[in-house]
Structures are given as C-alpha cells and as structure tokens.
Image (tube, coloured by chain):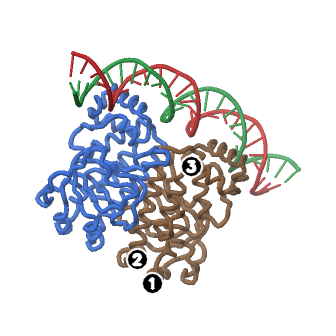
Chain colours: A blue, B brown, C red, D green
Amino acid sequence: MAAMTSAQQMPRSNHLLAALPAASYERIAAHLECISMPLGETLYESGRAPHQAFFPTTAIISLHQVMEDGASSEFASVGNEGMIGLPLVMGGHTPPGLATVCAGGAGYRLKGQVLADAFEHDAAVRRLLLRYIQARLSQIAQTAACNRHHTMEQHMCRWLLEMLDRLPSRELVMTQELIAGILGVRREGITETAGALQRDGLISYRRGHITVVNREGLESRACECYQVVKDEFRRALGLYATA
Amino acid sequence: MAAMTSAQQMPRSNHLLAALPAASYERIAAHLECISMPLGETLYESGRAPHQAFFPTTAIISLHQVMEDGASSEFASVGNEGMIGLPLVMGGHTPPGLATVCAGGAGYRLKGQVLADAFEHDAAVRRLLLRYIQARLSQIAQTAACNRHHTMEQHMCRWLLEMLDRLPSRELVMTQELIAGILGVRREGITETAGALQRDGLISYRRGHITVVNREGLESRACECYQVVKDEFRRALGLYATA
DNA sequence: ACTGTTCTGTGCGATAACAAACAAAAGCCG
DNA sequence: CGGCTTTTGTTTGTTATCGCACAGAACAGT
C-alpha cells in the first residue's frame, strides 16, 4: 500500500466520485486514502466481512463467481467508472464471489462506515449509488446472456474493450492463462483467439502483454454487450447515452 | 386483471412483504391491489417507463435479456419470494431486459410512487429492499457463471427446482418450446433432456404440463447454483441459512 | 551464457450443443 | 368422428469448445 495522500487536492479520477455534488464529495474526501492495488490482490472474498470500499483510478478489479469444482467466471469488471464494496451499503453479509485485481494500479480506499453513513444520511450519495447499483445489475445480466449466446471471440473482444476503456494506456499486462481464468475458458482457446486477432492486426502481444492496435476492429468483432453495458454506466453517472 | 380486494385482510403470501415489520407493512397494505397475472403477459420492457411494482404470490416472473438477433436468456426468476420493479427505487431509467409472466397466477400490484416513498422515508423498508437487491445481484451473478460452466441438464434441473419452490403445486403449465426460450437453448435440447429426466423417474410430462415426481433426484442432478441462490434469498429475508 | 521456469503454440480426439428437416403424437373443435 | 394445429420425438450433420499432451519460445536469475 503506497503513500497516503489526502485525496482532497487530487483530481477526481474516479468517475463515480466525480459524479458527486461538491458538498457530498467534500464530506467524504477527507477519508479517502490513495492506495496502490497490485495485480492479483484479493479485495473481497466470500467468507470475510468487508470493511472497506475501493474506488479504482487506474486499477481494474474483476468480480467473479467460483464454482465448487474450482471453475470460475467473471460477472463484472470494475475500474475508474465505479466502486467495489456495494454490500457495505446494502447492509447484507458478504455475498458469494470474489473481487481480485486483474490490472494493477491505483485507487482510493474508504472506510466502510464512512460510506455507509454517507449513504444513509446524504440523499445525493444515496441517489447516485442506487443508480450505480442499477447499472451493475444490468452489467451482470448482460454478462449472463452473453455467456449463453456469444462466442469466445466476441466475448474476448468485448472484454478487451472494457479493459481499454478503464486503462490509462493501450497495453494490458496480463498472461493468456490469466485471461482464460477470468473469462472462464481454456487457455488454449485464448491463445487461438488472440492469434487470430493479432493476424488481423487488431492487437499485438508478447509474453504477458497485450496491446490494442485497432480499436474499431475490436468493436466490430465484439458482441453488442459491450455497448449496452457502457451505455448503462453512462446513464447511471448522468452522462449522455452514446448516439 | 381480477377483482381488487384490499390486501389488508389477506395473508401475506409474498415473503418479501411478510418480512416487513407490521408498521411498515400497514402503511403499504392499503395500496396493494390483488391482481391476476396471466401466462405470457409482459410487465416490464426496455422502452417503457415503469409505474408499478409487483409482488407475485402464485405467479412467477422471468427476467430476461434479449439480444439483437432475438436470442434471449433468463437471468433471474421472481416469485413469491420477491418483487418486480427494483428500478422504481433505484431511481434510474428502465433497464434493458424484459419481465414476462412464465407461470400464470396471482400477485399484488403497487403504485411505483408508493413504493418509492416508502423506500425513501421508511428505514425498515429501505433496509429490507437493499438486502433483497443484494440477493438479486448474487442470483444474477450465479446465473452468469452457471451459463458458462454448467450443462443444459444441470441448468434445467436447477430451473425446475426454482419454479417448484415458488409454485403452489408440483405441476408446471408450460411447453418445452417455452422452457427452451427461457433458458436460451434449443427446443430439441429440452425435449431430449426432459425425456432423460422422465426415463429416470424424476419428472413426468404431457403436452404442456410437467410434473415433478422426485424432487431429491432433481436436486442431485442440478448444479450447486440452485442452493447458493436459495441461501442468498433466505439470508436477505432474514431467515436462517440452510444447514 | 546457461538453465530452469513460465508462457505460448499446436495437434489430436471427445463432447455438448446447434441447425434443419421431418415424423409422430396429442389435443382442439367443428 | 375426422381434420387441423400445436407440441413432442428423432435423425443427421455441423460447430464450438473442451481436455490432454507435448513442443517451442521468451524471459529471469545465477
């Protein structure tokens, strides 16, 4: 965990925080700690009660469900557009599922109690988070349908785009093995698909690094789910939907 | 839509309503209208803004996402344990997706404004609904993973059990074609799977009717998702988790 | 530079689900 | 009863993904 600068004088590089009215933000800002989130770190897991919320700025967190046989599958990814720790405001227990850092980077940490209080007493915070939760619901629902109907290539293109939208650069630091684990498919499948995408000039990669070369190309080979989910989050944060 | 009896003197046959403290319930009860929900009716669709919430008692609603190419896939089913109309309290727009009645029956209808007000001003209502939303999130997340990893037979057994838990009888009135549409698979697949389950004495069926004969058998052939989701809802409603 | 480890590439056969076409019932209604 | 419609059953071939096995390449550390 890196240096703890107060977040007040920093740009609000997390869109969810940025969408708060100034008064609400200021009440929270003093409690935000700037931390680094190293690749592979687990922020939430089923057994452990959560006490912190996280607002990624450059990091990306993958939420996934793990099956009894060890197979797993991402149902949502969270980056600078959102937060980790919804159970804190929903007052329930820790849900099944796991939150792990799939792209190392930075983010803010906030004490669960501070968030819960803000949600309870500040209507603006509450409204925003509820809209965010609704977008999250759509995101997961779309993923469920995507998992049933779309091909591996479509899904992978979608996922690359989602990562890209949240990353400061066009490069992902990530092995094919890891991607396969996240998407819940075999590593060989990713090798093959990535090979095809590289052949067609959409991406280029070397051991543990993938660079997106042709974004439009990826968009045309991704499934509709990418755009659907993106629009939902834009609406939730009060931005206009894309044309 | 059937006769509108005030719900006050009726048993609270919807578990979510039943979980409310008496004071909170009474404030709402006068506004509950008892209605019938015929098979096939659409309660929510992407374009239309929602103005009503629904609390099924004997009916079951299937929430599904529809793809551009017309393919669709259920991501949650809602019966007497829950409600339809979460967007009303989350303050957002109508999400993508569709809510249709997949088992005809009865339920309560509540004006959206009444629900929104209760959520805004009554902390008990808010707490309960937030816990319910959390369970719904888990339900959808589990379905996403289920869609990726489990077989059609596992999924179908899971789904039959979920229907059974919410139905007054052991019989579903429903064609194989319809089931296939809900689960997002081919009708032939359902025919084959249903045939196998009948051969093994777990269910029996005739044109448009399926009767569950051996519940334990189904449980052993369903995937873990059934139990995981069931436990989440029990917790949300304040019941004990199963042993 | 050498060596070991971690990634990536490739080639099988197996399997689950798809697509389409058609046959056979089951129920509805005159 | 007899015909029509809807539902279910069956067949054949195709495709996407899996599971496994192993080879080659890239990189990291000594």
Quadrant in the picture for residue A4: bottom left
Q: Chain of mark 3?
A: B
Q: Secondary structure at mark 2?
A: helix
Would residue B15 appear left or right of A117 to someone viewing this image?
right
**Which label is found at residue B108?**
none
Q: Chain of mark 1?
A: B
Q: Earlier in the sequence, mark 1 or mark 3?
A: 1
Question: Closest to the observer: A237 or A91?
Answer: A91
* Residue drawn where x is 38% and y is 42% of the image: A182
Type of amino acid under label 1: Ala
Residue B136 position, x and y percent, is: 45, 61
**Which label is found at residue B124?**
2
As measured in the structure, the alpha-carbon distance from the residue carrying label 1 to the one carrying label 2 is 9 Å
> Residue A243, can we see it?
no
Type of amino acid under label 3: His
Residue A70 position, x and y percent, is: 46, 45
Residue B169 position, x and y percent, is: 67, 65
Q: Earlier in the sequence, mark 3 or mark 2?
A: 2
Q: Secondary structure at mark 1?
A: helix
Quadrant in the picture for residue A192: top left
Question: Closest to the observer: B127 or B109?
Answer: B127
Q: Earlier in the sequence, mark 1 or mark 2?
A: 1
Type of amino acid under label 2: Ala
Determine whether A107 is above or below A203 in the image.
Answer: below
**Which label is found at residue B155?**
3
Q: Mark 1 = which residue?
A: B23
The reply to whether label 1 and label 2 mark residues of one chain is: yes
